[in-house]
Image: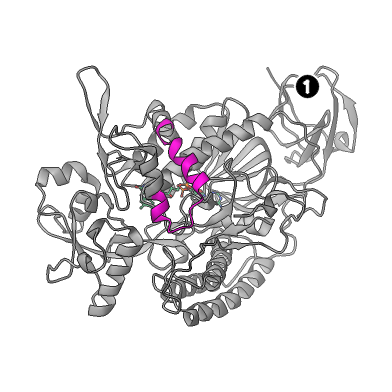
Amino acid sequence: MTRVLETISSEFFNNSRQLLKLPPTLLFNSQNSHGHLINTAITIGNKLAYNNHFFINSPKLTARTKVSIRAYGQTMCEFHQHDVLIIGSGAAGLTAALHLAAHGKVAVLSKGGVNAASTFYAQGGIAAVLDKEDSMNAHIQDTLSAGAGLCHEKSVRFTVEHGPASIQWLIDEGVNFTGKTKADGSIDYHLTQEGGHSHRRIIHAADATGKAISSALVERVQKEENISIFENHVAIDLITLAKLGLPGNQCLGAYVLNTQTGSVETHLARFIILATGGSSKAYLYTSNPDIATGDGIAMAWRAGCRVANMEFNQFHPTCLYHPKAKSFLITEAIRGEGGHLCLPNGERFMARFDERLELAPRDIVARAIDYEMKRLGIDSVYLDISHKPADFITSHFPTVYERCLTLGIDITREPMPVVPAAHYTCGGIVVDLDGQTDIEGLYAIGETSFTGLHGANRMASNSLLECFVFAHSAAKKIKSALDTDFNWPEIPKWDESQVTNSDEDVVIAHNWNELRHFMWDYVGIVRTTKRLQRAKHRVDLLQQEILDFYSNYKISNDLIELRNLVLVSDIIIQSALQRKESRGLHYTLDYPNTLAVARNTILTPPNTPVFSARSRQRF
Ligand SMILES: Cc1cc2nc3c(=O)[nH]c(=O)nc-3n(C[C@H](O)[C@H](O)[C@H](O)COP(=O)(O)OP(=O)(O)OC[C@H]3O[C@@H](n4cnc5c(N)ncnc54)[C@H](O)[C@@H]3O)c2cc1C
């Protein structure tokens, strides 16, 4: 039942305490005497719900629950209260939302449209043990071997063992994977093989797996009454007890820019999940969409969370090299199905670098291409699958085929030009097997997190799997704690009283370009200490300049992203400088050897919650 309290005069709010008869769900619409919507705090029993014309779900409300209502603003600044706030609408965020929908009110934020995520662009597929010839141990061993001594075996085992159930869940949610329907109606799913995998274990939807996953999950999420999707909402920073100057180690929500209205909203929740994806936009060339600016990692760091292994950024060996092809990745499955890497004269070169040829792990293939390009001074190498039958190519790789054809390249007849590009962030926010960070109530899942699965190098198609497995485990943990009581402190609204509109947005565009250029040149596939120090010097200057800008001018999406990217770049550089060896994706000419003992690079922010047991956890 819903009741609307309309046009309550501002005098009513003056710390009045009333005993009200309220229905379990209350639609609250408060206005001041001028008819403007105003900020309102409602305390119901010992729970605080901030709201303004939004539903408050209060199952424990009785007819005589003590209710106090207090107004503290004259103009509208939206407060939203949820049980769970999920920042990110990719594979990780949507999966967590669907697992939680039956247990509470869930909000999902996305920077742009709900599909504005790396997930949508995933081509190859998801790794899981689905074939009788394959085994959990083989998948675990392959992952450990790709991770170059830095994977956490517990995390690898946990992920791999939950793989088949995650795939079944996706099938049940309506994802149409490629396969043949058998006489008994069951489906024989096609499994492909990718670099580093000893078996065929990649389940896929042709070469547009991410699109199939996104479409199915978005459709499901849109049908759930308990899930609200906030598109064009960019989280700026987390709200924590520590940031409010209060004792305790708890995340309470986030300040969020609504890019349609330009206003900053306050989203509060008992549990907050960061599912914000990676940070490959720190580099000039990337396969990632524009959203991949490391926002979750930066927000978590500023809130006091540890961040680990950020020097391990994976460069995908094969992005299409064409002036009109913005960030178009050529799936690894093309090499899995027999594609050859060649020089402009047609010569295959991978045999000189690794006996696994084109199926060597990505870092080896990317470095080999980088080496050949620098050696010969060429703009790209070539990937050739044209020796396979044309109908095999068009049925297995329809997306790549069509995209290349629109650019005048017929991959059934000729090779395609390719270059490496920043692709995947192996490091991230330190979490446990439930996705719990160093801060109570704050979880991180998917590419933004550091679970220990990938070690020094992610094995292809393990990343989507990680999203599903950890979204599920985080949701399970959150579900078990949703009913616990919590005393909400007063949360200040976003304060813009000291800032003005910028008349120099060129600074943002310039700094953005400068950052991505020097990250590519100095912190890229092959590193040296001197280059890293050069990058550190520049990033320090940029951080200062952006801090000034942030303190003095109104917030915008570009400014939020740049502020985060600069911070994350600094963390990448610091991590790379700390690693005095070459291992996995981190390759430095000054330390070409791999040390006998493998150690994670864990950076701790100055404001880390010292009393957190998790922050003392060692790896
Ligand atoms: C081209 C390409 C191909 C790939 N192919 C594969 C593959 O075949 N197999 C595989 O396993 N992996 C693949 N990957 C990697 C994999 O797709 C990603 O690791 C995975 O999709 C990440 O999912 P996620 O949910 O963590 O983040 P994403 O899918 O990136 O979603 C991040 C979400 O967070 C939102 N967001 C970010 N910052 C904010 C903010 N400040 N406020 C509000 N919202 C925010 C974004 O809008 C987005 O909705 C590929 C990646 C790319 C780019």
Mark yes or no: residue 377 visible: no
At label 1, counting other C-alpha atoms closer than 10 Å, the crowd grade (few under 14, some 14-19, many 20 or more) is some
Residue 343 horizontal/vertical position (percent): 17, 69
Q: Nearer the viewer, residue 333 or 552?
A: 333
Residue 46 horizontal/vertical position (percent): 83, 31
Q: Residue at x 60, y 76 (%)?
A: 540
Q: Residue at x 66, y 59 (%)?
A: 302
Q: Quadrant of residue 115?
A: top left
In the image, is residue 289 above or below residue 441?
Answer: below
Mark yes or no: residue 608 visible: yes
Whether residue 363 sits left or right of residue 54 in the image: it is left
CB at disc 1 and ligand 1 closer than 8 Å: no
Q: Quadrant of residue 7?
A: top right
Residue on which the image places disc 1: 61
Residue type beneath disc 1:
Leu
Q: Which portion, as a residue range, is magenta? A: 143-165
Q: Quadrant of the N terminus?
A: top right
Q: Quadrant of residue 601?
A: bottom right
In the image, is residue 253 above or below residue 383?
Answer: above
Q: Nearer the viewer, residue 359 or 390?
A: 359
Q: Label the magenta part by its dominant secondary structure.
A: helix
Query: Is residue 550 rendered magenta in the image?
Result: no
Query: Is residue 152 rendered magenta in the image?
Result: yes
Q: Residue at x 81, y 43 (%)?
A: 489
Residue 361 horizontal/vertical position (percent): 33, 58
Q: Quadrant of the C terminus?
A: bottom right
